[in-house]
Every structure is written in structure tokens, then in C-alpha cells.
Image (cartoon, grey):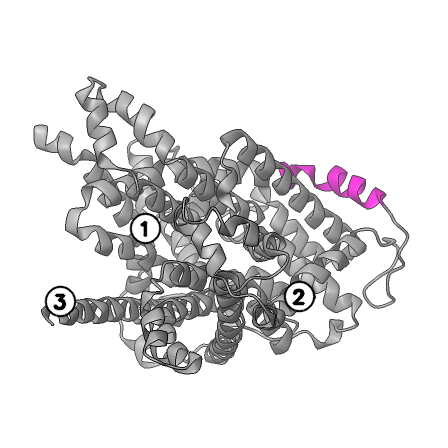
Amino acid sequence: MRWLRDHLVLILGILILLYTFVPIFVVVLMSFNDPSSKLIYRFDGFTLHNWLNPCEPEGMCHALGTSIQISLLATIGSTILGTLMAFALVRHDFLGRSSMNLLIFLPMATPEIVMGSSLLALFVAAGFAGQLGFWTILIAHVMFCLSFVVVTVRARLAGMDDNLEQAAMDLYATPRQTFWRITFPLVFPGILGAALLSFSLSFDDFIVTNLNAGNTTTFPMYVWGVAQRGIPMQVNVIGTLMFMVSVLIVVGSEVNSRRRTAKLATR
Amino acid sequence: MASTAGTAPVTTAPASDDSSRRRGLTGYVLLVPGVVWLALFFVIPFYSLVATSLYDPGGSVFSGYEMSYQFSNYWHAIQDYWEPLLRSLWYAGLATLICLVLGYVLAYAIAFKAGRWKNLMLVLVIAPFFTSFLVRTLSWKLILADGGLIVNSLQAVHLLGPDGRLLATPFAVICGIVYNFLPFMVLPLFASIDKIDHRLIEASSDLYANPFVGFWKVTWPLSLPGVVSGTLLTFIPAAGDYINAQLLGSPNQRMVGNVIQNLFTQANDYPAAGALSMILMILIVAMVLFYVRRAGTEELL
């Protein structure tokens, strides 16, 4: 009884965590589903068919390819722009600092539907209504990922000890050498984290994308479309793969950083 | 920052940071690309949205709109769509409250009770959300489906009538919102709770406060910054969301996001959609300002 009282909060916490995994179990399970009819969405039998023929549903892999392209480009764009801004915010003095903070904060506090519709209003007003597609989606994604990159990299930079840079300078390193040998490697984990965040924000976005996509179809838009008609089980294969790849990345980086700390500790 | 330089040694880190910031052109050069992007594709679009909301509703996307400062667009939008508008705020508010309860328990457990499993549990909080938002929501659709395990067991214990259902009810929509936005609540709460000095809680129990009083007088007030940013990070996207309402609800659970999206993409009624978008934004900004004032955490930004 006492044990239960001591551990009640932890047990509740673990239960809540389990609850967040329920849909993942369903996604994994359904990726092995052998549906008896296209219209009824339930588990009918086990098959490997979906895993062996992932691109069978018409248009799905094309949409997936479009999504990956857009997310990669949006990640590169927003990571570069955002990292530059973060450096300016932490390391440099300039006029209008508080309005700059507001400009970076606002996109994160605006509902996606408002952001998406205002961008659409601009494209239409500028006469681009007919050209909505890949490029307008990319523009939108760089825009809403940017703030998240700035915030992530800024946190890393602000928490950084600048003694190492001072030491490098004292040892006659040029500013360029100091930057590339000391500063950049130290900030890099922050930049990498920001890039991963951008990629997943961009890859997963539906609301802003859908408003500015024209005839282009991204993976979330494909899923939205088939949700009305009958969902091919391959969607769950992609869902499972996404989950596995991201878990691998997270676990990999965790192991890597542990190994590095262990190495430092033994030196 | 020259004026603060003299006092810098007295105060701690943040102030001395200021004086070490380099001046000159480089700062501006680094800022320009990002600022231009945000100005072109975030600030100016906002202006177009305001303009769109005031267009003459008589026009169309193809023939073009005339700017006639139709403030009546707002009035009409409220008259026609007050129901989904209120429903959005209500669903988002309720979901935020449920998220707060669940998220607080989870964040508290991770921060104080998880011991060496802290990092692992933190990763597990985010892990499910690596799968696509839509795929996850569709899997809730399956879980809550008629004739599914949950509906059947609820019917067996008579919590749900024989023809009762979960799907296409407000319950399903709110559950979906709670589920999808939970990490936005847990992470800021964790950041706040994790910083609390454990000795303060011990002190309260040494002074004969029972655990509940101790929680209410010590832990809760110290975690308020996390509560404020967590609730905002949950409420704002939840109020604009329409994916859950569309996939898990019926037309009776239509939220304002569904309406705006339909007006833009199907009905092509840009002025009404713009006005409705603006109304949503104004309501959210007003509520956020009021809330932040009341909660008294100004350092949020």
C-alpha cells in the first residue's frame, strides 16, 4: 500500500505514456493487415503484402517523394537563415532587438490556418493564383520552420561557454579559425536538432500546405484525400517506417553523445 | 548597451552578455536574409489577409476583387459562423484543460520520479509524434470505431447505449485534440518543474504541510511559467485545428478551421474566409493577452 502511494505519480505517468503509444501500435498492426474490403477499416488478417508492395496505391509514393523533396529543401533553407539570425541575436548588437524578438515569436503563436490563409491571400493578390504548387509550398515551409530554428540554435548558443573561444583567440587563432574549429563544432548539435525539427515540421504539415498547394500533392495531403475514400494499408507502412527512422536517429544521437562524454571522462 | 556596461559586473550572466555583443554591420548582415523572408512571407501576407477581409464580396478569384472597405464582411462572418467559432474556442479550451491535467502528471513524474530513466521517458513523450499527424489521427478513428473494442466494452458495461457511438461525437474530437497536442503541454511543463529546487518541497513538509498543501503552495506556483507557456502552445494550434474535427467528428462538430478552409478552397469566397481568419486571430490574441496579464508572467516572450 505504501509502495503504491510512493509510486502513484510514476505509475500514472507511465500509463499516460502508454496511452500516447496506443495509436502507434495500431499503425504498426494495420501495416500487416490484409483487408477484406476497401471500405471497412479493421484488422482482418495477417499479411506481408503491404510491406513488400509499399508503392502499390496509386500516387502515394509520388506524394511521398514530393514531401521528402520539399522537406529537405525547406530544412536547408530555414536552417541556414535561422542559424544566421540566431548568431546575430546572441552575438551581435543591433537596433530593434525587441521588435526582432516579436517578429520571431509571432509565427510560432499564429494558428496555422491564419498563417496559411494569409499567405494564400498574398499569392492571389500578387497574381500567383494559377502557379500555386511546389514553390509556394516550399516558401511557406521555410517561413514557418524559421522561427523554430532560431529558437533552438539561440538556446544552444546562449548556453555556451565562450572561454574556449577566448582561449583560441589567445593562442593566436584567426577569427575564421576560431569560428570553424571551436564555435561551429560546439553549436553544431543545436543546428542539427533544429534541422531535424524543421524536417519533421515540414514533412508533417497539412493545414498551411493544403491552402497553398494548388495541384501538388504532398504525403499528408494524400492521406487526407484517401481518408474520405478508403485507406490503403500502405499508409500504415509509411507511418511505421517514419516512426522507426526517427527513433533510430534519436537513439543514435543519444548513444553517440554518451560515448563522447564517456570518452571525455576517461581522458 | 553602453549604459548597462557599468553595472554589468554587479548583476549576473545575462547583463554581462549584453556588453560582450559585437557591434557593427555583421549583425545586420546576418539578420537580413531571415528578416526579408519573414517580412515577405509572414508580415506582408498578414496585410493581404486584412485587405482580403475588406474586399467587396461581389467579386471572385477569377474576375478579381474590388477594395471597398466592407467592414460588414466581419459582421456577416460572425452571423453566419458564430457556432463553429464558439465551438473551436470551447473544444480547444476543454482540450487544453485535459492536456494540462495529463501533462502535469506526466511532466511531474518525469522530473521528480523517473530517476535515471528521465531522458528515456522524455524521448518516449516525443517518439509517437514522429509518425504523421494524419496517420495517428486515422488510427484513433479505428480505435474509436463503431463495433470496435472500446465501443463494445463500453456498451457491455452500459456506459454507452446499444446504438451509442464514440466516433462523430464531440468526445472523439476533443480526445483527438488532447492526444495530438499533449507534447506541446508536457515539454514546457517539464522544463519548468525540472528546475524546481527539491529542498523547497522538503522544507514545506518539514513545516508540517501535508503533500497537497505543499504542492499547492510550493510546486504549483513555481511551475506557473511552464503552465502558461504550455497552455498557450496547446490552445493556439488547437483552436485553429480542423483535422481532428474532420476525421473524428461529423459536420455537427465542425470547427472554424473547417469553415475557413472550405471558404478558401471550395466556395472560393475569399472575403468571408479572410474576415473569419482575422476574427479567429483577434480572438486568440485578445484571450492570450488577457490570460498572460492575469497569470502575471510577463517574461514569457
Within the image, what quadrant is residue A39 found in?
Answer: bottom left
Which residue is pictured at 68% across the width and 73% down the height? A132
Query: Which stretch appears magenta?
Result: B71-87
The N terminus of chain B, quarter of image: bottom right
Q: Amino acid at mark 1?
A: Thr
Q: Amino acid at mark 2?
A: Phe
Q: Tell me if residue A237 can be seen.
A: no
The dominant secondary structure in magenta is helix
Q: Which residue is mark 1?
A: A20
Q: Amino acid at mark 3?
A: Ala
Foreground residue among A121 and A255:
A255
Question: SS for tag 1?
Answer: helix
User: How far apart in space, not on screen, are marks 2 and 1 (Cα)?
Assistant: 35 Å
Foreground residue among B49 and B251:
B49
Q: Is residue A82 left or right of residue B284?
A: left
Q: Which residue is mark 2?
A: B41
- Horizontal and vertical percent for residue A217? 56, 73
